[in-house]
Image: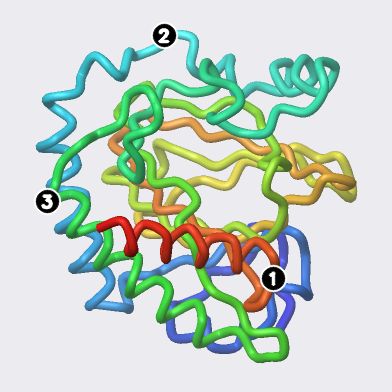
Amino acid sequence: MRYSVDGGRVRGRELKQMTDFRSGPSFQHLRHLDDDGELVEALLACVKQVKAAADRFTSGHHRDANALEHVSEKALESAMQRGDVSDIRTEGELSNCLVFHTSGLAGSVIDATVMQLRERVDELVRERICQLITGPPRADLLVSGHLFYPPGGYMGWHTNSRVPGWRIYVTYAEEPGKSFFRYRDPGTGEVVTSWDDGWDLRAFSAERKRPFWHSVYSDTNRFSFGYRLVPEGSDRRRGIVRRVLRRLLRS
C-alpha cells in the first residue's frame, strides 16, 4: 500500500500493511493509534509523569510569542540559504521544547520515573514497528529524541541529516488541531502542514543528498517519542553494541 502525503485516516490495525519503510513516499502519516490500548496506556502514564517532572525544569522552557515565525515559510527560506541545519545537538537555539530522552541537552527533564515509563513505551513501539519490517534486511529501532512541547513550544526548520535514515515519531497532543508537524516536500518543494489529531504516527526519510526540511509548532501540551530505524549488522549498530558492552564491563 502507498500512503498519500498526509493522506487518509489509517487505523492502527492497518499498520501491518505498511511492511517496508524503504518504499513509498518520503513522508507518511498514520492516525488513530488509540486502537492500540496497551501502547496508549503506556504513553499516557509517561506523559503524565513528564508533565509533573517538567514543573521542576521550567527554566528550560520559555514561551516565545513569535513561535509561529520560527516555523514559517520565510524562516525556511532563511534556513535553506544559511545551509544545512541538522538538529538540536548541533543548533542549541533551534527549539524551546523540553527533552526527556537524555541528560546531555539543555532543558532536559531528569526524572527516574520518567525514564522507567519511557523505556516501557520504547519497548512497545519497537515491538510494533519491527513487526512491520519484512527482511532482509532486518532493522532495530533506536531512540532518536523524546520531546515535550508546552503551549508556545516549537522546533525550527531542520533536516536531521547528521544521522540520515528513516525517522518515526509517535505523538500525543492534548488538544487536537492546535499543533502540527510542517515539512517541505523534497520532490515538489511544496510546504505542507500536517495537523495533530490527538494520537499520530509519522515516518519520514532523512537524507543528506535530498534534505527533508521540517519543523514543529504547538499551542497545547504535545509529547513526541522519536526513533531511528537502524539496519541490523550496520557499522553504526555494531558501534552502539560495543559502547553498551564497555559500560557493562565498567559497572
Q: Amino acid at mark 2?
A: Ala
Secondary structure of the residue carrying numbered label 3: helix
Q: Which mark is residue 234?
A: 1
Q: Amino acid at mark 3?
A: Thr
Name the residue carrying label 3: 113
Q: Residue at x 64, y 90 (%)?
A: 134
Q: Earlier in the sequence, mark 2 or mark 1?
A: 2
Residue 160, position as x, y percentages in the image: 66, 42
Secondary structure of the residue carrying numbered label 1: loop
Q: Quadrant of the C terminus?
A: bottom left
Q: Is residue 127 left or right of residue 88?
A: left
Q: How did the renderer colour the structure?
A: rainbow
Q: CA distance from mark 2 to mark 1?
A: 43 Å
Looking at this view, is 66 or 250 the one in front?
Answer: 250
Q: Is residue 239 left or right of residue 105?
A: right
Name, please, the residue furthest toward the front.
250
Q: Nearer the viewer, mark 2 or mark 1?
A: 1
Looking at this view, is 109 or 65 the one in front?
Answer: 109
Looking at this view, is 98 or 186 the one in front?
Answer: 98
Q: Amino acid at mark 1?
A: Ser
Secondary structure of the residue carrying numbered label 2: loop
Residue 244, position as x, y percentages in the image: 42, 62
Q: CA distance from mark 3 to mark 2?
A: 32 Å
Q: Quadrant of residue 83?
A: top right
Q: Residues within 10 Å of mark 1 (few under 14, many from 20)?
A: few
Q: Earlier in the sequence, mark 3 or mark 2?
A: 2
Name the residue carrying label 2: 65
Looking at this view, is 139 or 192 the one in front?
Answer: 139
Q: Quadrant of the N terminus?
A: bottom right
Q: Residue at x 66, y 74 (%)?
A: 231
Q: Residue at x 33, y 72 (%)?
A: 123
